[in-house]
Image (tube, grey):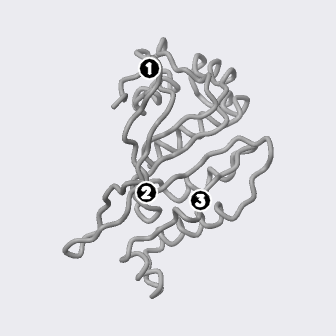
Amino acid sequence: EGEDLPGSISATAFVAWYNGHPDYVDFDVDLSGERAVVVGNGNVALDVARILLDDPDKLAKTDIADHALEKLRASNIREVAILGRRGIAQAAFTIGEFLAMGDLPGVDVIVDPAELVLDSQSLSAEDSGTLDSSISTRLRIARDFAGRAATDGNKRVVFRFLVSPTAIAGDGKAESITLVRNEFVEAEGRVGIAATDE
């Protein structure tokens, strides 16, 4: 509900906008708010967050579209929340992209350690030392981020796990998003997720 409100933008449109696709030169991207929410946690989601939080002077040295750079220079975005409906073990971003988020100058990476929940199969593999090396590395990086202290005045990228959007609301534009917490469920040896009441 509310997905078609102005301000709710598909990743395809947003990426086309900052990459200078001719069909998106006049696309209206409202960056007047202080928080942006990215639904999904693959490499494109991290790219979107990086574009929204990185120093425009640094972006100016890339091939980013001029119209996007001008808008990003005037942006009020101070925080980007990245939502993953599953856990850290199932996150779709690559290790390099995840690690690079911690290298953005003036940006804190926020991870709630309580959300770094593993499904029973991953937990069992971690306990036995047989957890897939890419999952193990992703988990180690996430735990490192979770242990870092925030710096006053910094922008923030907040990784949320096991949450799904249920509604977007606002008066004529997207102003809020309602999330539901998910939990792991297992049936016939397969791990899935289900929404909770929270």
Of callouts 2 and 3, the N-terminal one: 3
The CA span between labels 3 and 1 is 30 Å
Q: Residue at x 56, y 54 (%)?
A: 98
Asked if residue 95 is positioned above or below residue 5 in the image, the reply reads below
Of callouts 2 and 1, the N-terminal one: 1
| The quarter of the displayed image where residue 75 is located | top right
Extreme residue in the right direction: 152
Numbered marks: total: 3
**Disc assigned to residue 162:** 2
Left or right: 107 with respect to 23? right
Regarding mark 1 in the picture, which secondary structure is present there?
loop
The CA span between labels 2 and 1 is 26 Å
Asked if residue 187 is positioned above or below residue 163 in the image, the reply reads below
Three-letter amino acid code at disc 3?
Asp
Q: Quadrant of the N terminus?
A: top left
Three-letter amino acid code at disc 1?
Pro
From the top left corner, tell me how far across and down residue 36 is, in percent.
Answer: 55, 34
Residue named by callout 3: 112
Q: Residue at x 65, y 37 (%)?
A: 53
Of callouts 3 and 1, the N-terminal one: 1
Residue named by callout 1: 6
Q: Nearer the viewer, residue 103 or 120?
A: 120
Judge the density around disc 2: few (<14), some (14-19), many (≥20) Cα neighbours within 10 Å: many
The CA span between labels 2 and 3 is 11 Å
Judge the density around disc 3: few (<14), some (14-19), many (≥20) Cα neighbours within 10 Å: some
Asked if residue 62 is positioned above or below residue 125 in the image, the reply reads above
Judge the density around disc 1: few (<14), some (14-19), many (≥20) Cα neighbours within 10 Å: some
Extreme residue in the bottom direction: 128
Three-letter amino acid code at disc 2?
Leu
